[in-house]
Image: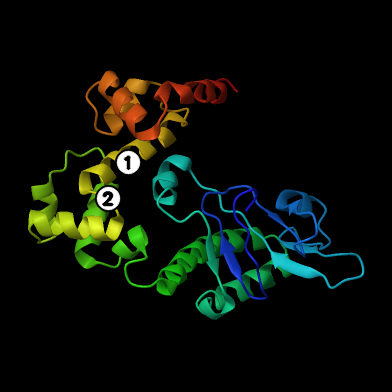
């Protein structure tokens, strides 16, 4: 990861960057790193999905690279709770191997249907990578992802994500999970790492940030209503408190998109 984290990759390793953060690669630690975008632009392979690099005269490392794009307002709230980087060693990618083998075959073959097939495979790869990652974590380390494996807490998380604007109460959620309020509050914090109400507040603001970038929802009051606030002022205060900046900071980008 550019400027933040270095990963030593071996043959068969898999890396998923849910945040889409900029990243670069190098063949050795003493070789200047190159942004992946530049390598893709000057790739040695004829396939748009395959990338090779290495020192002149040395062995060529070939990587299968792909991006995954989707509607921000639909997915950002989920991506925000995933790890910044998911790194799987070859020994942990058994469930991914058949999918990646098929993907590589489609990449090399090309043709009219290849892009459609690869788009569907990309969705499956993301899901399987997250599943495989959770299995590598020790009990108690999985955080939000691990909470999805708890039948009672996952029921609560599903309800919150389906209706983030709903006025949830701890009693109502505890009833949904067939737990006492104290048990729900304790287990939720232990698994997710925060309280139920703090989680709901965070999810609402992440959802709001994505909605503010959607040109079909240009009015702040409408976004406020969609995440459960009755007034623009109350929403703006909550957004500032949770995100650290005012929601109006996203407005210039919204205006540009709507005018283009």
Q: Residue at x 20, y 60 (%)?
A: 187
Q: Is residue 92 above or below residue 213?
A: below
SS under mark 1: helix
Q: Is residue 208 visible?
A: no
Q: Residues within 10 Å of mark 2 (few under 14, many from 20)?
A: some
Q: What color scheme is it?
A: rainbow
Give whichever of 5, 89 is nearer the camera.
Answer: 5
- Checking the image for residue 202, the label placed there is 1
With 30 as the anchor, is 210 left or right in this view? Answer: left
Q: Residue at x 77, y 62 (%)?
A: 47
Residue identifier under label 2: 194
SS under mark 2: loop
- Checking the image for residue 40, the label placed there is none
Instruction: Mark 2 vs mark 1: give the one in front.
Output: 2
Give whichever of 33, 229 is nearer the camera.
Answer: 33
Does the CB distance between marks 2 and 1 fall below 8 Å? Answer: yes
Q: Earlier in the sequence, mark 2 or mark 1?
A: 2
Residue 6 lies, in percent from the top left, at: 63, 59
With 117 as the anchor, is 233 left or right in this view? Answer: left
Residue 29 lies, in percent from the top left, at: 75, 62
Q: Is residue 137 above or below residue 164?
A: below
- Give the CA distance from mark 2 to mark 1: 10 Å
Q: Is residue 122 visible?
A: yes
Q: Is residue 227 above or below residue 126?
A: above
Residue at the far front: name it: 30
Q: Residues within 10 Å of mark 1 (few under 14, many from 20)?
A: some
Q: Residue at x 22, y 60 (%)?
A: 153
Say which quadrant the C terminus sits in.
top right
With 86 as the anchor, is 32 left or right in this view? Answer: right
Residue 35 lies, in percent from the top left, at: 73, 50
């Amino acid at each position: 990861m550019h400027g933040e984290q270095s990963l030593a990759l071996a043959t068969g390793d898999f890396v998923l960057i849910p945040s889409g953060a900029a990243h670069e690669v190098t063949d050795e630690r003493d070789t200047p790193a190159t942004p992946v975008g530049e390598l893709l632009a000057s790739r040695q392979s004829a396939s748009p999905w395959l990338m090779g690099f290495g020192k002149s005269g040395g062995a060529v490392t070939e990587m299968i690279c792909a991006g995954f794009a989707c509607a921000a307002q639909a997915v950002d709230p989920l991506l925000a709770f995933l790890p910044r980087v998911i790194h799987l060693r070859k020994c942990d990618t058994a469930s991914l191997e058949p999918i990646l083998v098929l993907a590589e075959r489609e990449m090399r073959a090309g043709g009219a249907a290849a892009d459609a097939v690869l788009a569907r495979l990309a969705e499956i790869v993301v899901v399987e990578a997250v599943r495989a990652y959770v299995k590598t974590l020790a009990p108690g380390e999985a955080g939000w992802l691990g909470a999805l494996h708890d039948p009672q807490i996952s029921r609560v998380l599903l309800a919150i994500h389906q209706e983030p604007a709903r006025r949830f109460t701890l009693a109502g959620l505890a009833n949904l999970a067939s737990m006492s309020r104290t048990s729900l509050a304790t287990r939720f914090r232990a698994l997710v790492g925060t309280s139920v109400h703090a989680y709901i507040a965070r999810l609402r603001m992440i959802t709001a940030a994505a909605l503010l970038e959607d040109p079909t929802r240009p009015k702040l009051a409408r976004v406020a209503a969609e995440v459960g606030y009755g007034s623009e002022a109350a929403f703006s205060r909550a957004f500032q408190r949770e995100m650290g900046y005012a929601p109006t900071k996203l407005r210039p980008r919204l205006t540009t998109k709507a005018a283009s």
